Image (cartoon, rainbow, N blue to C red):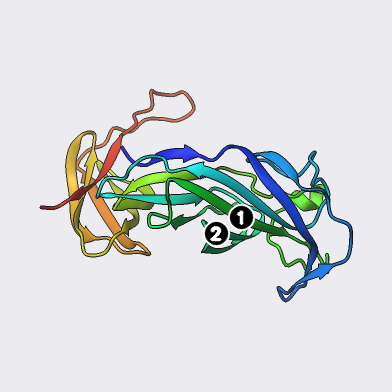
Amino acid sequence: MYPHRMRLHGPWQFEPLARTVVQHDGRIERVSGSLPEPGRMKMPATWQGTALDGFRGRVRWSRNFHSPRSLEPNERLWLVFQGVDYFTDASLNGMSLGRHEGYFEAFEFDVTSLVGPRNELVVEVDCPAEADLAHRRLIRGTLDRQDAGFVGGIWRDVALEVRSVAFLLDVAAQAALHAPGGTVTVTGRVVGVPGISLALDLSVEQTWLAGQKIQASRNGTEFRLEAKLERVECWWPRNLGEPKTYSFRLELHGLA
């Protein structure tokens, strides 16, 4: 069952590069000031309570790792970030992976062609101060309003994931009652190598009810499956009856 995950926990090297401030128009400017000393930190972690406590600026993080294992012909290797605060530039073995902006949104890169027996991951994280607190540039919720020193950094997991050449993403399910029956609608995307013939199968209570032929794409091919149930068992809330739940299963298959 995919994905197979290797979390890049443990000590990372870090080196503060510059103090920075972000303008309302998005420009990031360097400002003068002393920098914290380089060091090591166990990740994931926020900057609070560490040598970077209260620091606003750009920090270079690095970590070495071995290849998880030899890949099968139908497998790909992805580098997944579950949450980095705020601007992120990532590179692997000297090759740029890309840039991301945000606080809690996950992002990922296909690194199949870049991973070798020994690897170096470098992540530069810029969490600048706000130039104008009345017109904030960063969308970070209320955390920095509650605590002016809060900085997340690489505050959630970074992991290598072994995935198949095609996989499901952003899957969501909705149920609707149309007495005496109902419907289950499942949406999402199929991401992967283009040109591979695939099929989606939707089962409810281990009974196949809907299917669709589909091809993956790099950005994800959207799908929508709807399963109709002839009769569903209703129940009363607030402890006025035993709740009846229904299980569904969505499967992605390759076609011969």
Could you tell me if residue 175 is visible in this image?
Answer: no
Task: Please name whichever residue, 219 or 14, is drawn nearer the observer in this view of the structure.
Answer: 14
Task: Please name whichever residue, 59 or 156, is drawn nearer the observer in this view of the structure.
Answer: 59
- The residue wearing badge 1 is 123
**Residue 118 location, x and y as percent?**
48, 46
Identity of the residue drawn at 84% across and 55% down: 35
Quarter of the figure with residue 114: bottom left
Q: Is residue 125 left or right of residue 65?
A: right
Q: Is residue 106 left or right of residue 88?
A: left
Tell me the element at label 1. Answer: strand
Q: State the mark number for residue 91.
A: 2
Compared with 135, 61 (above or below) is above
Q: Amino acid at mark 1?
A: Val
Task: Please name whichever residue, 76 or 82, is drawn nearer the observer in this view of the structure.
Answer: 76
Farthest residue to the left: give it. Answer: 256
Identity of the residue drawn at 45% across and 30% down: 237
**Residue 39 location, x and y as percent?**
75, 43
Q: Amino acid at mark 2?
A: Ser
Compared with 222, 38 (above or below) is above
